[in-house]
Image: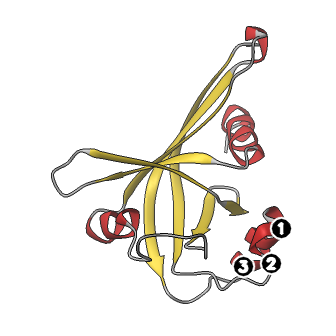
């Protein structure tokens, strides 16, 4: 990663929640807030958790199964506009029923609410490009 990409990556992973964009079958966007953890620079993981849901067959999983392209958006807003920023990362995702090495620990360390939860399926995202804007540059 370039120094600029590393700053963008660090801003992205500093946020507890971001927006995950996947593509519906008709090509339209499907956007959903999601929790995630970094396994290494350029790789994120998320998992289906035990929060109440109408189904564990989430649309984001079906979308990624059909088209692996994903976009992730994180941002920071406050009244002091000198502190605004956003990061947009794009890449490819895959789904696995098998817990990736270190993924459960990474998510449970980041989100204490996951303690004692059975997690999965797992969504692995490899970031191929990252762009950002900050008010302080």
Q: Would you name the residue on which mark 2 appears?
A: 115
Q: Which numbered marker is on residue 112?
A: 1
Q: Answer above or below: position of 18 versus 60.
A: above
Instruction: Give whichever of discs 1 and 3 has the lower sequence position.
Output: 3
- Above or below: residue 103 compared with residue 27: below
| Image location of residue 52, percent across then percent down | 55, 70
Q: Secondary structure at mark 2?
A: loop
Residue drawn at x 65%, y 60% as measured from the top left: 36
Q: Does residue 3 lie above or below 94 as drawn?
A: above
Q: Identify which residue, 69 or 75, lies in the foreground.
A: 75
Q: Which mark is residue 40?
A: none
Q: Nearer the viewer, residue 41 or 110?
A: 110
Q: Residue at x 67, y 24 (%)?
A: 85
Q: Position of residue 127 (x, y in %)?
A: 53, 53
Left-right relation of 80 to 28 = right
Question: Does residue 36 sit above or below 47 in this rendering?
Answer: above
């Amino acid at each position: 990663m370039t120094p600029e990409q590393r700053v963008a990556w660090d801003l992205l992973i500093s946020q507890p929640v971001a927006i995950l964009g996947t593509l519906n079958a008709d090509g339209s966007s499907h956007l959903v807030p999601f929790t995630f953890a970094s396994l290494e620079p350029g790789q994120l993981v998320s998992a289906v958790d035990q929060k109440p849901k109408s189904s564990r067959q989430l649309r984001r999983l079906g979308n990624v199964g059909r088209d692996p392209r994903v976009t992730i958006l994180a941002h920071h807003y406050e009244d002091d506009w000198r502190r605004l920023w956003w990061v947009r990362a794009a890449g490819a995702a895959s789904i696995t029923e098998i817990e990736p090495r270190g993924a459960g620990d990474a998510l449970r360390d980041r989100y204490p609410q996951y303690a004692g939860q059975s997690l999965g399926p797992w969504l692995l995202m490899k970031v191929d490009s990252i762009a950002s804007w900050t008010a302080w540059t």
